[in-house]
Amino acid sequence: MAIDAANPVPPVRPRPAGEAQIGAHVPPELVRRTGMPFGEDFNAGPHAYMAALHQTQPPIFYDVSPMCNAWQLIKHEDALFALRHPEIFGNEGGSPFPRDHDDYFYLLPVEIDPPHHRKYRNIVDPLFSPQGVLKLEGKIRKLANDLIDEVIDKGECEFTTDFGRPLPVSVFLDLMGLPQDKRDTFVQWAINLLHTQDRALMVETMNLVTGYLKQVIAEKQANPDDGVISRIAHAEVDGRPMAPKEIFGFVFFLFIGGLDTVFAVLNNIWLWMAENPDRRQEIIGRPDDIDKVVEELLRRWGVTFSGRSVLQDFEMRGVQMKAGDRITCLLPACNFDPDVFPDPLKVDFDRPRKTILAFTVGVHSCMGAHLARLEIKIALQEWLKRIPDFRVKPGAVIEYKPGAVIGPESVPLVW
Ligand code: HEM
């Protein structure tokens, strides 16, 4: 069936979930119940857990979960193949966000595959290109310093709420044309959608987000500005104005994608720097290598995954997958594939350059990747210039927030 984002229909195939929906073609010896990404073992140390999968699991295994049963891909090579072949591993029904089946919409551009995908990306890609995001550099540096001003004399902070979240979220809200004074509400909505298995909470939050974004879109249609939402609200595809459902699905996905990811990477990096003063000094001592530093830190702290639907029966490494199955490319695990990144948990700024999967690859590679890289680079440069020496607050208990974006819940620091 041709995909028409202007007139979306719910996925024809429900996502397989739970014990009752393990297909007959799935060999019992490949079935696992890991509890990722909500289980205790996983959240005790998600990155170490995912690195260990290369010793504890076969390269492809079938994980059963109440949310979605899926083949888990942990080899770098396998994920690259899957992500670069959308005709086999597509994004139909790609996301678990609960949607009203009578008023369905696609999350654009992530749930649309070629040939339709590119026309949506073209609308906003220029704003997120390397040149596009460089225009934000001065603003991001100022914001980083304003946030540091607030805490530097106190000798302590809760990194997440004082710096890690407000920096990228404020940049993002300005870019989108959304009000800064609703920042905390937006963040809470993103948390409710990305970090829970509570369907009722997800549905309730979906209703709040939907009502709010529809109202914002209507305002931008009446009073255009230079933000991303306005640009989408006035965009054309195929020589016609975008339909309401295309506009909404695009704005909704950006809203979710932009709020909860960069901060998780920052939290992971700052926790590591707080615990590894020698490595922090190494970063300070290599200012000209900052881009290499950021890339290796992104490899080491991947925070999310790429899920796909199997569109045609396909065999990979001798494993028979059937149309309708789901796969998850466990991107952080792929970044720990020892065949590609020896001693994978070690942070090594001089690793030979290889494709990292933090932002996925292929048609759906992250649209915000250049922005995220720039924010992480500026955060490192400005923070380390002014607070070069810091550690985790004594007695602080670090806990990971379960869910689809991996990072410590809070990172209390002292200096
Ligand atoms: C370090 C921060 C970030 C990480 C690790 C990250 C990661 C990812 C990943 C893994 C995907 C692929 C999803 C899939 O395959 O299903 C993706 C897609 C996407 N991300 Fe990000 N992201 C980050 C920041 C951002 C930001 C700040 C924005 C928006 C401003 C953004 C917007 C998007 C969009 C629009 C897509 C869909 C692209 C498409 O389907 O063509 N991301 N991101």
Image: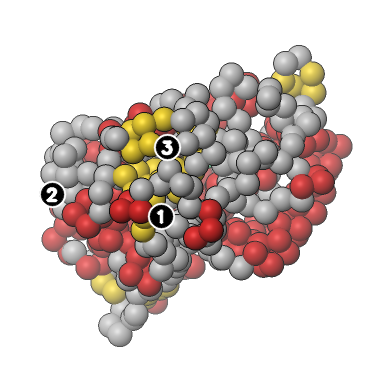
Q: Quadrant of residue 236?
A: top right
Which residue is at a point 77% across and 47% down the rendered structure image? 101
Q: Which residue is mark 1?
A: 63
- Residue 67's place in the image compared with 123, above or below, is below
- Residue 122's place in the image compared with 404, above or below, is above
Along the viewing direction, whichever of 252 and 328 lies nearer the viewer:
328
Q: CA distance from mark 1 to mark 2?
A: 26 Å
- Residue 190's place in the image compared with 137, above or below, is below
Dot 2: few (<14), some (14–19), or many (≥20) neighbours within 10 Å?
few
Location of the N terminus (image quadrant): top right
The spot of residue 118 in percent (x, y) is: 58, 22
Q: Is residue 181 left or right of residue 354?
A: right
Total labels: the figure holds 3
Find out whether the residues at labels 1 and 3 contact each other: C-beta distance under 8 Å.
Answer: no
Q: CA distance from mark 2 to mark 3?
A: 31 Å
Q: Which residue is mark 3?
A: 321
- Residue 251's place in the image compared with 40, above or below, is above
Q: Which residue is mark 2?
A: 343
Which residue is at a point 28% across and 83% down the rendered structure image? 394
The amino acid on which the numbered mark 3 sits, given as a three-letter code, is: Met
The spot of residue 260 in percent (x, y) is: 52, 55
Along the viewing direction, whichever of 266 and 364 lies nearer the viewer:
364
The amino acid on which the numbered mark 1 sits, given as a three-letter code, is: Asp
